[in-house]
Structures are given as structure tokens and as C-alpha cells.
Image: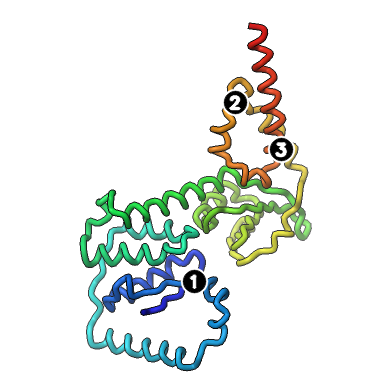
Amino acid sequence: MKHITIHNIPGFQEWREAARNALIRDIAPEQILWTTGQDLQVDLFNATRPGHEKQADAAEKDSFDRFLTKRPPRPVHVPQTFLKLCEMALCHQSQEKFSLCYRVLWRLANENKHLLNLKTDNDVLRLNALFKAVQRDAYKMTAFLRFRQITHNGTEHFIAWYEPEHYALELKLDFFKTRFKNMRWSILTPYRAAHWDTKCLTLEDNPDPSVYPREDNIEKYWRTYYANIFNPARPKKNAMLAQMPKKYWKNMPETDLIERMLMKSEARTREMLEKS
């Protein structure tokens, strides 16, 4: 069994290189155990790996180098669509994502180069499901993220705290850079933060959430705006919750108005029915 650890998050480039090397060596999917850097932190024994394991790793690398010298790697051609699917799917929180992507890669190279066209194939179905889940999560970030204003080193700065379901932050950074290109902002998530100074974007792992202010002067404008666009005529609470789940409400200042506005809407509806 070959162990491959992906240390980076989300890890697409690292997985791509490791998967390519494994495919060159004709290592079947069932012969690989994919783990992450987080898995290693949980496994305390990995903090002090026995010397013979380290020697085995070095010997394996030497063996691989000799293998490539004797046998040039076969060209690996996969559809660009597959790489796009993997880049998005590997942002998912699923524990199976690395093994799933490699299994599909293996099958594309060894079984059927048109595998992705088989929409009822279990692996293809699962890969597309991961892709769509991350895509939805990334879209919700553009809809539900709210900035709060602070002063940093005498300069106006905007901070947002957002909790995505998956590792979706990097997928929408171009959107925020374009939309708020003249603002200095920071987007904090539990696993990573992005900082924009109007020119350069920097990333920071494991940011401190305490720097996010509890409130600011902008919130009253969000509440006023939301109250003005709220349509009390035909509120559909279930549909609203489907589009804007309650788990996002705690970081959205306007949501504390919703219950009150719904109650007023129901009262208005009853009043209209009684008068009709």
C-alpha cells in the first residue's frame, strides 16, 4: 500500500503532481491510501516516525528516479473538463475526494477515455456531485458575505467573517477583487484569510476571528436596504430558508429583521382577508 499525503488546502496542484507520478508507475487506485496534513496532526504517531519508515520513503524515491530513467513516462492525456471538475471537487470537505479523483483519472487512462460522458457511472455521478456542492457553496459566499468597517493604521479597512461549508474561499477571490478593487478588505474563514490592499492579494492560514468587529456603522444601511426591498405581499418562508439557510444569518446584520417582518406580513394578510 502506497501512502500519499496532501499537505496543502485545497491541494489540487499537489494532488495533480502526486496523481501523475502514481499513474506513470501504474499504481492502481486500490493500492493508494490518500491522507491530508490534518490527518497527520490527528495521528500522534506520525509526529515521531520511526527511522526505518523515513529510510523506506527515501528508498522509494530512489527507486522511482531509476524507474523514470529506464522507462520514459508515458504521455497522459485527460480532458480539460476533468481537470476543471477535479479543481472544484477537491475543494470539498469529503474524505474520499482525493481517491475518487484518482480513480476517475485511472479509469480515463486505462479503461475509457470517454468515461465522463457516462452520466450514470457511479464515480462520474459522485465527482459531479462534489463539483456542484462546491459551486453552490462558492456562489453563496458572494451572496451572504457582509463586510464590517474598521480603521487600521489610520486607513479605512473592511473585514468579513464567513464560514463556508467547503474550501471555497479561493474560488471567488477574483470576484471580490473586481467588485471591491478600490477597497482595502479582508475575508476571514476558519481555515484561511485573504487580504486585499487595492494592489496585492495575500493569503493567511488559520486567521484570528477575534479581529472581526461585532458591529459597525454600515449595518444600519443594510437593515434599511433590506427592509425596503422586502416584499410583504407574498412571503414564502420555506423558499426563503432554502435560498438563505439560517446558518448564514449570524453574520448578516439584516437577518435580525426577518422574523419581525414576517410577523407583520402575516398580520397584514389576515387583516386583508378579514376585510375582503
In space, the residues marked 3 and 1 are separated at their CA atoms by: 39 Å
Contact check, label 1 and label 2, Cβ < 8 Å? no
Q: Which residue is mark 1?
A: 36
At horizontal 54% and vertical 38% (from top left) the residue drawn is 243
Colour scheme used in the picture?
rainbow
Q: Position of residue 144 (x, y in %)?
A: 60, 44
Q: Amino acid at mark 2?
A: Pro
Q: Which mark is residue 235?
A: 2
68 and 199: which is toward the camera: 68
| Quadrant that contains the N terminus | bottom left
At horizontal 37% and vertical 54% (from top left) the residue drawn is 126
Q: Amino acid at mark 1?
A: Thr
Q: Position of residue 268 (x, y in %)?
A: 68, 17
| Quadrant that contains the C terminus | top right
SS for dot 1: strand
Q: Which residue is mark 3?
A: 256
Q: Position of residue 10 (x, y in %)?
A: 49, 64
SS for dot 3: helix
SS for dot 2: loop
Residue 106 placement: quadrant = bottom left
Q: Is residue 227 left or right of residue 75?
A: right
